[in-house]
Amino acid sequence: MTASIWMESQPIAYSNSLQLNGAADVCVIGAGIAGITTAYCLAREGKSVVVLDDGPIGGGETQRTTAHLANAIDDRYVEIERCHGQEGARLAAESHTAAIDFIEATVAREKIACDFERIDGYLFVPAGEPRDILDEELQAARRAGLVQVQLVPYAPMANFDTGPCLRFPNQGQFHPTKYLNGLAEAILRMGGRIYTGAHVVDIEAGPPALAKTKNGPAITASAVVVATNTPINDRVAIHTKQAAYISYVLAFAIPKGSVTKALYWDTADPYHYVRVHSMPNDDLLIVGGEDHKTGQAQDADVRYSRLDMWARERFPIEGRVRHRWSGQVLEPVDGLAFIGRNPLDAENVYVATGDSGMGMTHGTIAGMLLTDLILGRRNPWASLYDPSRKSLRAAGTFLQENLNVARQYGSWLTSGDVSSTDQVARGAGAILRRGLTKVAVYRDQAGQLHELSAVCPHLGCIVEWNSNENSWDCPCHGSRFDCNGKVMNGPANSDLPAIREG
């Protein structure tokens, strides 16, 4: 069983390392949807761009998306309007609509075979829950300018009666790694450079800005864009305004045409999200949900089981699960991404983060918006997505999330998961207290023990073992490390140090 359906189209790796120091107009750090789209937009404007990533194109959270392309905001227009006002909600609708249009136009322009298609989206309420939210959301969406949104009697599901739901027309879906591979080829064709296997360890604003890589070579540039899902160059400012969540996904083989192609979402908390992806011999039903804070739950099998049961009760599923995976979602306290100049930094350093479950459209918005900012052009969305913004109406969520983070530091005082390394099974990990320190212990399949510092190098939280992904996850700000301590997700930008005997 693969970690993701998208792995059937492998992300592309380019040069394994920088051979020489180099210069560019813009250095983009991160080769996911936001970074590659930004590089593509800038290259089309005639700018020289260099993309640096320590993994392949789209090899991070982009390959773990379910690739919904929607202007139906995950946090709902009622909430966006409450936090950002009616004009803010209108700009949110406008920008996400423009993102889908951009992807469609780019697919046509670059002739990218990535299964892009336009479909409708349906928002419904779980059985037994009040339907008032649909009326409220309908009016909020229309005030935001989505005048074609309709209340319809039911979603087009033959095996499940959703009851009344909202229909959001003209949404979209695509194959994300095929799309990014196509953009990468276009960037190279326009003279841009892409280096995978290039881990950036330090960013100096300059001017000129300097991005230093782990192996020594560096890139100088007039501007730097940090598009690493969560910023690796920011210790605190952004990370107090967003929280990391893990979301789970199952993909089932179903008979071709047995489920109408559409995006489906319910209003549960956490909510479920569904779409259909065509394969040569059948369709794949992709179902996600069961979210929890990163590093704060160890019951992945239970969550997959609940997701499986929920899907089988509503859709024509007969066989086993074909794919299952999880991904990390960054939830901003006010529902919208942070795209623009990095707070408390020089004016030539930009960030794109806070996908809020809408990474494909937020990442595309980042490409369009950051290009305008770097070129000195006015963009009507700039204030809405400004990373320095403060939303007093989201103060309650801000306080709740940061109190949650503060509580995680209590792990320093606990005894640990095990009292002896003998209790750690093969292929498993656990936290062990050793005097005043905490040790992350992993025993590989051959029985060899690997001991690491359990202290996240970002801000000193104690990591937790994730048995689903065989990773060490930080419950404070979402940094993740593989079983051997290699950093996989920021904001940490270095590995968990190995503990040496003696």
Image (spheres, helix red, strand yellow):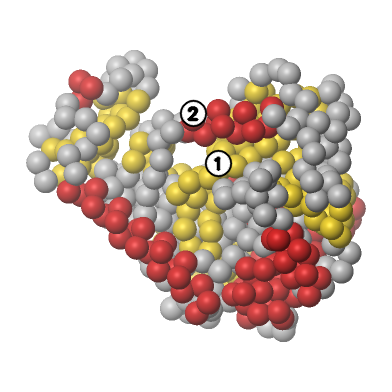
Give the residue pinned by disc 1: 290
For the point 57% across and 50% down, which residue is it?
Answer: 269
The label on residue 44 is none
Q: Position of residue 487 (x, y in %)?
A: 41, 45
Crowding at dot 1, Cα within 10 Å, few <14 / some 14-19 / many 20+, comes out as many
* Towards the viewer: 217 or 326: 326
Name which quarter of the figure residue 384 lies in: bottom right
The residue tagged with tag 1: helix, strand or loop? strand
Residue ID at (25%, 42%): 453
Q: Is residue 359 left or right of residue 284?
A: left
Q: Residue furthest top?
A: 446
- Rendered image quadrant of residue 279: top right
Say above or below: 237 vs 192.
below
Callout 2: 10 Å neighbours few (<14), some, many (20+)? few
Residue 120 in view in this figure: no
Q: Position of residue 321 (x, y in %)?
A: 65, 23
Q: Earlier in the sequence, mark 2 or mark 1?
A: 1
* Amino acid on which the number 2 mark rests in the picture: Asp
Callout 1 amino acid: Glu
